[in-house]
Image (spheres, helix red, strand yellow):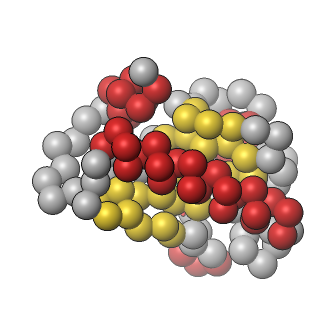
Amino acid sequence: MDCIFCKIINKEIPSYTLYENDYVKCFLDVNPLSNGHTLIIPKKHFKDAFDIDEEYLKEINKASKRILNLLNDKLKPVGFRLIQNNGNLQEVKHYHLHIIPNYIKNDKKSVEEMFNLLTK
Ligand code: 5GP
Ligand code: ZN
């Protein structure tokens, strides 16, 4: 299947991965809306919120808490937005949850710089 996120899971495309287990992968968005913008995806291909099964949804929720804590500790944002697009709003047709930190002032850093900051 020609799915960019399945390719990321299979390591055919590299990603700045912050956390992964048997169910999920959490990696930095290549085109972030703010520093630390992270995507959480199931390691099995589900199209969207209608398609995904509850076991994976639970694992995504668990991983989201882990990522929220990591970003909160390291980046000290003033808030977070969690977004999950479906249908016409969804660009990549493999379920993904966006974790988007919010800052009073976002000094835009490179994704690589953010990865180093978040993993050291
Ligand atoms: P959507 O609009 O489908 O909810 O968001 C898709 C997101 O995936 C976008 O924020 C986009 O920047 C991100 N994205 C698309 N292709 C890649 C990629 O190859 N690597 C990474 N890390 N993010 C990607
Ligand atoms: Zn996929």
Q: Quadrant of residue 11?
A: top right
Q: In this orientation, which residue lies closer to the viewer: 1 or 20?
A: 20
Question: Could one spot residue 113 in this view of the protein?
Answer: yes
Q: In this orientation, which residue lies closer to the viewer: 38 or 46?
A: 38
Q: Quadrant of residue 27?
A: top right
- Position of residue 64 relative to residue 117, above or below, is below
The residue under the point 64% across, 30% down is 13
Question: Could one spot residue 47 in this view of the protein?
Answer: no
- Number of disc labels: 0
The residue under the point 17% across, 43% down is 107
Q: Residue furthest left?
A: 105
Left or right placement of residue 113 versus residue 3 in this view: left
- Position of residue 89 relative to residue 108, above or below, is below
The residue under the point 22% across, 57% down is 103
- Position of residue 89 relative to residue 114, above or below, is below
Percent across and percent down for residue 81 are 41, 67
Percent across and percent down for residue 82 are 48, 67
Percent across and percent down for residue 118 are 41, 32
- Position of residue 36 relative to residue 94, above or below, is above
Q: In this orientation, which residue lies closer to the viewer: 29 or 24?
A: 24
